[in-house]
Image (cartoon, rainbow, N blue to C red):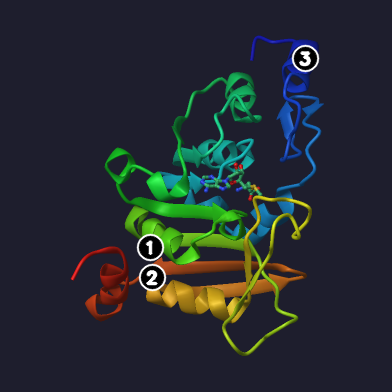
Amino acid sequence: MSMTPNEARDLVASIPHWHHKFEIYPGVVTPGSYDPVFLWDKLQIDERCAGKTILDIGASDGFYTRRMDMLGGNVTAVDFRRKEAHGFGVMEKLYGKEFHYQHCNVYDINVDGVGQSDLVLFLGVLYHLPDMIKAFHKVRSLCGSTLLLETHSDNDFSKDIPAARYYKAASLAGDITNFWSPNAACVLDMLHDACFDVVRHETWGDRLLVEAVVSDDPARSRKMDIAYGRL
Ligand SMILES: C[S@@+](CC[C@H](N)C(=O)[O-])C[C@H]1O[C@@H](n2cnc3c(N)ncnc32)[C@H](O)[C@@H]1O
């Protein structure tokens, strides 16, 4: 914290695009397009971070990573962008701590490197992934207890039938990194088959939040074992 606010502002200005809007240094707020506090409050994890191993998949500018660290969590961050390519590296400098950061695609997270985390945050990432089931299978292998998942979720075209809408090219929000918007029933069923038990879920607008815990039922794991193994 030996930096002046102006030096901190210059560091923040060196990043061309911020996703998270938050006070990154006393009196210095990042020019992010997304206020993460709304979702943070819905996660209900303030009392659950201390002493826990936590994996923040798709950490972006690190708002959640830093906050969980402040609350006593042992956090590993993952993102397929280099930490210097977005605000994460600047967040570390201004917070005064370097996090364990895996620069990789979610499908390639090194399980040996992190083991199974008590808490896995998988927020705002699912709809960016071409293979949602494969991602859930991976996330299950990384999760020792609790998963918090948040995603874009279209429920207007089909509510009762588990279904996902595919978005061609950049037709979802003008962003070519978007692929699918699964409805809530689809997400819950995919989580079931990936060996998670849903504890609570909530939708607002076109977003969905799910909290789930791991299941060790071998009958359920068989489906994924077949899909990603060999017979
Ligand atoms: C919409 S942002 C969500 C950021 C944060 N989790 C939140 O909820 O505010 C998606 C983040 O996931 C990362 N991401 C997208 N696809 C990824 C993938 N296949 N593997 C790893 N990270 C990915 C992006 O770089 C970005 O930082």
Task: Find the distance from the CA under tag 3 to the CA under tag 2.
Answer: 44 Å
- Front-lying residue, 97 or 216: 216
Q: CB of mark 3 within 8 Å of CB of mark 1?
A: no
Q: 71 or 82, which lies in front?
A: 82
The answer to whether mark 2 is within 8 Å of ligand 1 is no
For the C terminus, the image quarter is bottom left
Q: In the image, residue 116 lies at what x, y percent?
A: 32, 51
Which comes sooner in the sequence, label 3 or label 1? Answer: 3
- x 57%, y 24%: residue: 92
> What residue is pinned by disc 1?
137
The secondary element bearing badge 2 is classed as loop
Characterize the local packing of mark 3: few (<14), some (14-19) or many (20 or more) Cα atoms within 10 angstroms.
few
Q: Amino acid at mark 3?
A: Asp
Q: Which residue is mark 3?
A: 10
Neighbours of disc 2 within 10 Å: few (<14), some (14-19), many (20+)? many
Residue denoted by label 2: 194
Q: Are marks 3 and 2 in contact (CB under 8 Å)?
A: no
Nearest to the eye among marks 3 and 1: give it: 1
Residue 128 location in percent, x, y?
Answer: 60, 55
Quick one: SS at disc 3? helix
For mark 1, does the 10 Å Cα neighbourhood hold few (<14), some (14 to 19), or many (20 or more) residues?
many
Q: Residue furthest left?
A: 231
Residue 95 lies in quadrant: top right
What is the x, y in percent for residue 163?
A: 59, 80
